[in-house]
Amino acid sequence: MNPQHDTHTRSRARRFVFPLIAAGVAAALLAAGILPRLRAQGALAAQVTTQSAQTVSVIEPKPAPATQELLLPGAVTAFSDAAIHARTSGYAQHWYTDIGAHVKKGQVLADIQTPELDAQLQQAHAEEATAQANFNYAKATAQRWQDMLKTQSVSQQDADTKTGDMLAKRAMLQSAQANVQRLTELVSYEKVVAPFDGVVTARNVDVGALVTAGGAPGLAASAGELFHVAQRDTLRVFIDVPQNDAPYVSASTQAYLTVQQFPGRQFAAHVARSSGAMDPVSRTLRVEVDVDNQDGTLLPGAYAQVHLALQNGNPALDLPVSALLFRPNGVTIATVDPTGKTALKSVTVGRDFGTHVEILTGLQASDRVIDNPGDAMMSGEPVNIARAGHAS
């Protein structure tokens, strides 16, 4: 073996090994310095991404309540309210009831003196008696001529003439009887009576005052009104129900009244009837609520608040108003999808409960709804969930 050849081989090996060792050492040193830095940069990037995502609170929808209380203002009115006018002209002879008096149906409120009408009635009776006598004579004459006609003692034309005269006299008698009946009715109006049980709320007549027949029908207080009578054992309260709540109002709807004069007291009431049509101007339904007022606590004309317990047999889901976004295309909610990003959904709002509303369409019970979403929130934004709760 040649010693020189071995020495040369070892020298060549050293030349290759030393660079490899140096490269390995350099790579190790480089890795020891770069990898932590890369890890730190990755962690920083992840932290920046996490901090850039908006933190939101989500709520879970809950079923809307089946019963909703609707509070509406109303005016208390008498069940029956009538302005009493004279049906015959004359002078007030006497009045018997003043304001606040409780009267019964048919009770006399005042007397009217009508001497001219009394004289006309007497004249009508005399004319009736004359017409009755003329008819009796004409009837007897016609009967005799009919008997003579059977024996050919008179002509047919003469008998028909007598029969026609009898019929004319009978018509005159009926006219006189009708006139007597008309004047008798007018004379009966000399006594002004109450049309129903109630309370006298106004008296506009005094003894000796000239009273003229007539008056404007349908007006609560028109010229010539003698008395005003209101029936207040049962009172009516008219309310206007908004269009959205109108379908839930029926005869079985529970109701009660509250008034300022009696704080904390509830007056039982019931829905009596509705107009059955929406007012095209206000888009409301006129509803009548009746109240038993046998004790006379409530007064007609008072202001009251009507509480209606509206029942919904198929309630939808419920969300607080703070979860709604009002966009140009309608009401929208923001939800968090399974990937942690936002998803906007258009919804239809139903009943309004004040601080929360019923959502009819566009919402699922499993949706995670963002509470108090930002106005600029869009779909696809990553978010962090702070806490989960229920709609309240």
Image (cartoon, helix red, strand yellow):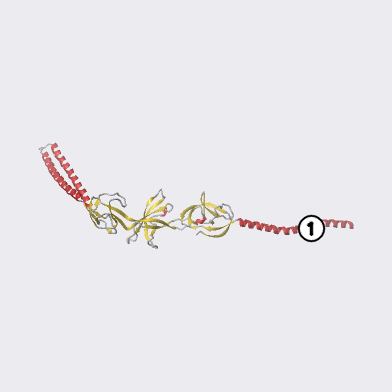
Is residue 213 rendered to the left or right of residue 139? Answer: right
Residue at far bottom of view? 264
Count of picture labels: 1
Q: Residue 57 sits in which quadrant?
A: bottom right
Residue visible at 72% across and 59% down? 33
Residue 151 placement: quadrant: top left
Q: Is residue 6 left or right of residue 161?
A: right
Q: Residue at horizontal 20%, vertical 46%?
A: 179
Counting other residues with Cα less than 10 Å from the Cα at mark 1, is it few (<14), some (14-19), or many (20 or more)?
Answer: few
In depth, the one of 234 and 145 nearer the eye is: 234
Which residue lies under the disc numbered 1?
22
| Relative vertical location of residue 216 with respect to residue 40 in this rendering, above or below | above
Describe the element under mark 1 as helix, strand or loop. Answer: helix
User: Amino acid under label 1?
Assistant: Ala
Position of residue 139 measured from the top left corner of the image (x, y, whole percent): 14, 43
- Comparing 242 with 78, the one in front is 78
Q: Is residue 189 left or right of residue 252?
A: left
Which is more toward the observer, 35 or 56? Answer: 56
* Quadrant assignment, res 149: top left
User: Where does residue 255 sit, x and y in percent of width and height?
Assistant: 39, 58
Query: Can residue 115 be seen by looking at this rendering?
Result: yes
> Picture coordinates of residue 364 (x, y %)?
51, 55
Percent coordinates x, y for residue 147 in the rendering? 11, 41
Residue under the point 14% across and 36% down:
157
Q: Quadrant of the N terminus?
A: bottom right
Q: Image check: 355 left or right of 288? A: right
Q: Which residue lies most toward the front here? A: 208
Residue 1, visible in the rendered structure: no
